[in-house]
Image: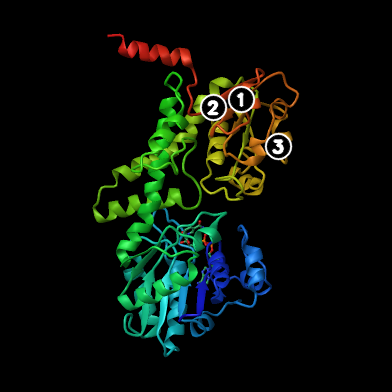
Amino acid sequence: MIENVSVIGLGKLGASMLAGMAHRGFNVIGVDISESAVRAVNEGRAPVQETGLEEMIHAHRDKVRATMSHEEAVLGSDISFVIVPTPSDSRGSFELQYARFAFELLGKALAKKDSYHVIVLTSTVLPGATRHGLLPVLEQASGKKCGKDFGLCYSPEFIALGSVIRDFLNPDFYLVGEFDKRSGDVLEEVNRGICMKEPVVRRMSIENAEVAKIALNSYVTMKISFANTLADLCERIPGGDVDVVSDAIGSDTRVGRKYLTGGLGFAGPCFPRDNVALGFLCGEVGADSLLLESNHEYNQSLAPRIAAKLAPMMRKGQTAAVLGLAYKPLSHVVEESQGVALAVAMSDAGMRVIGYDPLASEGARSAFRGGVLVAESIASALADAALVVVTTPDAAFRSLTAEDFLAGKESVTVVDCWRCLDAGVQNDPRIQYVPLGRCLDEDSSRAVLEELWAN
Ligand SMILES: NC(=O)c1ccc[n+]([C@@H]2O[C@H](COP(=O)([O-])OP(=O)(O)OC[C@H]3O[C@@H](n4cnc5c(N)ncnc54)[C@H](O)[C@@H]3O)[C@@H](O)[C@H]2O)c1
């Protein structure tokens, strides 16, 4: 039975994997090239911000240790999970330089090990990268043969920032791309030890697993785009309400309700780039990338389109506030954030824009590079705002009252991208409440339909 595992890369995903595996009883050696990440783990602290991470590392200090030595990790464990960055390049592909460097160090360590060891790549890569981009590095540095002397798997995780530990311990399924049966058997055994319930394990070739990882994320982005298309349509249908429609069609088991809430586009560090990468790959191998490219283009078009919708609601010289700059509530991450994109698009459309986020103000400030102001508090963001856009259903925004939005003014326009604000705000006569995804103008949308069907 495998008891000793190692995690190479103690970032947003790796640190949570280390904590989760220790929680499930494994002895875990963490490796990072960052001295501060290693020190943090050894002092029982979280190297990155993530829900429950600090508490879990602290609680299992006797089961975890961190080092900067890949050799120590390989010699002290039976399986190593590699979870280093694979940043997007200018073509949309994923760069392998961090993974190559890690594989080289792991290969050198394998050269000194007599017993069988499995390397598992968890970082997101494109099809072919594991076998053709990384395995040769491992074999060359170790002087050993995969399948004979060591094993190799590609096994990505499907987690969301903010719930990484929970998602890691309770996945819908584990995806195991195996070089050979022996490698897959070892990983499946470890997965069974990690999972809080009886795990669903899907075993396949490395290449099919590489396709499946990126395809799943890309599929979800299409569902989001479809919901956004419905929202846009419902704004033009008398009495239209995207939530009513989504609730109905989401009840069909072929569709499902998850990720079917019309609002803003898909965002964050994974969805947009994974979709672009799948399109890139299709193009490179001669497969059709039209659907993927259209989806990306559509998603990119949302912020400017909403900014154009809002422009007529503002008079020259007035200020607009954007509440929500992180890519989702309770996050400090602004990568590909729709709130940031919308604030920039509104600023580009000539509006004076001030943004606010409970956690992401610092990141947003550097993303804006001065083009959009960032307020220190909700109250200061709302003080002069004639129009307020709420871009995430953050509890801090959902609990705002009509008086908060008015901030002493006679009237204010409030644009609710997720239809999440309090009924008192929605119904206050001093507030022009604009819920995206619901009919925005009953009379004109009725007139359009009347004309369409008159003959
Ligand atoms: N963050 C997510 O939501 C998420 C979700 C699914 C998949 N992924 C994938 O996981 C991978 C890692 O993502 P992340 O968000 O955890 O990255 P991250 O940047 O937060 O962390 C990566 C860590 O790896 C360390 N590192 C770099 N080279 C190393 C080496 N040679 N040896 C040891 N450590 C090294 C870095 O110092 C850093 O601490 C990426 O491929 C990403 O696409 C991330």
From where the camera sits, is residue 36 visible?
Answer: no
Q: Amino acid at mark 3?
A: Ile
Q: Decide: marks 3, 1 in contact (CB < 8 A)?
A: no
Residue under pointer 1: 426
Of badges 2 and 3, nearer the viewer stands 2
Q: CA distance from mark 1 to mark 2?
A: 9 Å
> Residue at image x 40%, y 33%?
248
Which circle marks residue 435 in the picture? 2
> Is residue 180 positioned above or below 239 on the image?
below
> Residue at image x 54%, y 83%?
72
**First in residue order: circle 3 vs circle 1:** 3
- Between 260 and 100, the one lying in front of the other is 260
> Residue at image x 69%, y 28%?
405
Q: Helix or strand or loop: what does disc 1 sit on?
A: helix
> Would the CB of label 3 be found within 8 Å of ligand 1?
no
Residue under pointer 3: 378
- Between 61 and 46, the one lying in front of the other is 61
Q: Decide: marks 1, 2 in contact (CB < 8 A)?
A: yes
Extreme residue toward the front, this view: 198
Quadrant where the image shows the C terminus: top left
Which circle marks residue 1 in the picture? none
Q: Helix or strand or loop: what does disc 3 sit on?
A: helix
**First in residue order: circle 2 vs circle 3:** 3
Q: Amino acid at mark 2?
A: Pro
Of badges 3 and 1, nearer the viewer stands 1
Residue 58: image location, x then y, percent: 67, 69
**First in residue order: circle 1 vs circle 2:** 1
Residue 265: image location, x then y, percent: 47, 39
